[in-house]
Amino acid sequence: MTHRILIVDDHRDVIRLLHSALDSLEHKFEFVEAPSGEEAFLEVASGHVDLAIIDYLLPGMSGLELKDKITIHNKDAQVILISGSKEKNIRKELREANAFAFFEKPISLTDFLDTVERCLKLERTVLPTEEENEGDTDAHKNMSGLLAKFRQNMDADVIFLLSDQGHVMARAGTLQDSSLEASLLSGLMGIFRAGQKVSGYIHQETPLSYHIFPGGDQDILLVPVNSAHALIVAGDKIAERKKVLDLIDALMMLKSEVEHVLDAMGVTRPPVEEIDRYLGTEDVPEEQIEDAITSDELDALFQQKTKIHTDEIKSFWDDAVDSQEAQEVDADKLSYAQAQQLGLTPENNA
């Protein structure tokens, strides 16, 4: 099935970017492009549209006005709004416009493509889903069930199990704003890797760098499972002072269970020496250091008493000038004579 997508933006480079990004998906799309709301609505009036991607600031009709007209004319059409505005009232208005999603420029293309797949109910190829596939092993199913059970007990919105490479190995639930999932997980895994690095520096036997982000749209907790995997939990007010200690205790139980299931899945942790090499915390053997100056060689350099005479310096400058006679003169370089006139030669400093 081919889905018809309308892209509305008065900047051609934005349209090209979104068009090219959508072309990278393994789905069939028909694209319609328009630089204004009026032209876009003519396209909608002449044919069905499955998805409209609309910039907020357009010449003439605004993006929100166009959205309303499209949904009245074509009730099944989905809408994704985009905007480069940083004004709080405009961002609030866009978030409350009942569109499928809203993106601020610059757009995270990974999040954007995943949102388009969800919006059109296509097979998700950008980010994995929590749905079980026929090829899943019992261990994978056990992991999904384990996360689902703990998510319910913790009253959380979502729990992710991620590898240190940022791959979602299992999940239960969804984020409140799933359109930013890829960017959020990428940022959290950067924090995870930094925590692993610190654990390596202080020779911590088991990584224990908990990270808590309370008070936003969702509270978020990041807890390492081992040196290569982490749990991310998000939910409404789950990190309040009176709840957070109980939640951490529950996560410690979940961490232990996850490790058992990972072992059953045959997912082994990398050896300590590989982790050290990955984190850059291993000691480099002296014989592997090339082109290094030893302390004895450095002392010998400083102990040299050879005096460089003025005529040798002049000879050096003359040779340098002679070697460049066939080349174009560089205005940023001085001849010895010019340096002498400016008082920059050794005899001037004597």
Image (cartoon, rainbow, N blue to C red):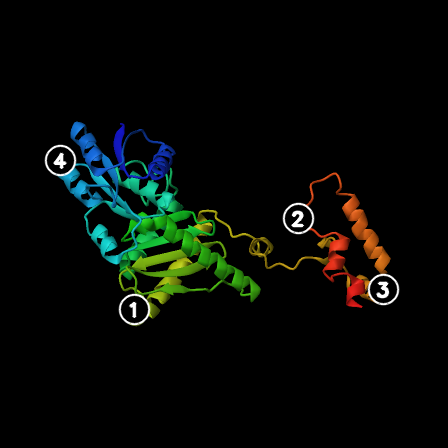
**Residue located beneath label 1 in the image:** 240
Name the N-terminal-most of marks 1 and 2.
Answer: 1
Residue at image x 29%, y 36%?
A: 122
| Callouts 3 and 1 close, C-beta under 8 Å | no
Q: Residue at the left extreme? A: 72
Image position, residue 330 (x, y; %): 67, 46
Q: Amino acid at mark 3?
A: Gln
Horizontal side of residue 44 vs 325, given as left or right: left
Label 2 crowd (10 A; few <14 / some 14-19 / many >=20): few
Relative vertical location of residue 37 with respect to residue 305 in this rendering, above or below: above
* Separation (CA) of disc 4 from disc 1: 45 Å
Q: Is residue 258 visible?
A: no
Give the quadrant of residue 212.
bottom left
Horizontal side of residue 42 vs 326, given as left or right: left
Give the quadrant of residue 45.
top left
Relative vertical location of residue 271 with respect to residue 348 in this rendering, above or below: above
**Residue located beneath label 4 in the image:** 73
Q: Amino acid at mark 4?
A: His
In front: mark 2 or mark 3?
A: 2
* Separation (CA) of disc 3 from disc 1: 68 Å
Label 3 crowd (10 A; few <14 / some 14-19 / many >=20): few
In front: mark 3 or mark 1?
A: 3
Name the N-terminal-most of marks 4 and 1.
Answer: 4
Name the N-terminal-most of marks 2 and 4.
Answer: 4
Name the N-terminal-most of marks 2 and 3.
Answer: 3
* Separation (CA) of disc 2 from disc 3: 35 Å
| Callouts 4 and 3 close, C-beta under 8 Å | no
**Residue located beneath label 3 in the image:** 304
Image position, residue 84 (x, y; %): 31, 49
